[in-house]
Image (tube, rainbow, N blue to C red):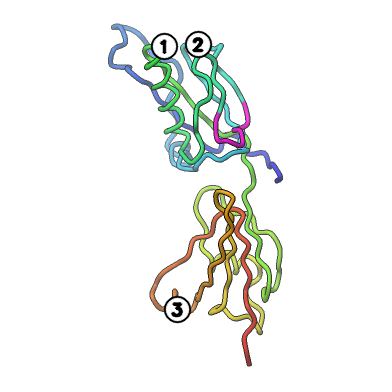
Amino acid sequence: MILGPKKALSFGLVAVGLCCLPPGTVAHGAPPAADEQTAGSRILAPGDTVQITVYQDPMLNTSQQISTDGTVEMFYIGAVPVKGITTEDAAARIAALLFKDKYIRNAQVRVSIVEYLKQVVTVKGQVNRPGPITLPTERPMDLLEAIASAGGETRAGDLSSVEVRRIKDGQTSTQKINLKELARQNQVFMVQPGDVITVGIRMF
């Protein structure tokens, strides 16, 4: 796996119990800008490096890589699962745990991705540029786009005979996809990181 630096790709800023702040109390830190909030929809994954800021207690501030089990380690509350959720959801989860365990009543938490793990699929078989394709970080990719990113099918390529091999929870599955039929039905097949895509050869 290759790590590529990306500064402040997404942000989550959450405060729990701010309605209970004493009169005259000012919340620390400005909310993220609109474009940052949009970027925050990216799902966190093991290998991403995140910056966690708790404005009420700098001792809790940390920059760390999400572990293989999908957690980050926080002082006071220990391992916090963040795999598969957005930065905003991660910030809310941390704030809620700090509130629940009575460490910080009005925790204001920001989570930002400062370095992300590149996620790829491999396209091979009858395509013009076989090899790994880096998935976009801001949106999902469908199977046809992945094949197009590999230069499209060759003259002998058959989009009605595409194989997708996927490993999930340690189990390998193989699925045959007829992209021509999906297109006729106005449907798409979304790829996932680690997929191995093989475009078959047309039978003349």
Q: Residue at x 38, y 75 (%)?
A: 185
State the extent of the magenta-drawn residues as a range. Answer: 64-71
Task: Name the residue that disc number 3 marks.
Answer: 181
Please report whichever mark, 2 or 3, sits nearer to the chain's N-terminal start.
2
Is 98 on the left or on the right of 125, as rendered?
A: left
Looking at the image, is 138 positioned above or below residue 153?
A: above
65 and 114: which is toward the camera = 65
Give the percent coordinates (x, y) of residue 32: 45, 30
Callout 2 secondary element: loop
Q: Are marks 2 and 3 in contact (CB under 8 Å)?
A: no
Q: CA distance from mark 1 to mark 3?
A: 55 Å
Please name the amino acid that badge 3 sits on. Glu
Looking at the image, is 99 positioned above or below residue 63?
A: above
Q: Are marks 2 and 1 in contact (CB under 8 Å)?
A: yes
Structural crowding at the residue carrying mark 1, measured as other residues with C-alpha within 10 Å and reported as few (<14), some (14–19) or many (≥20): some
Image quadrant of residue 25?
A: top left
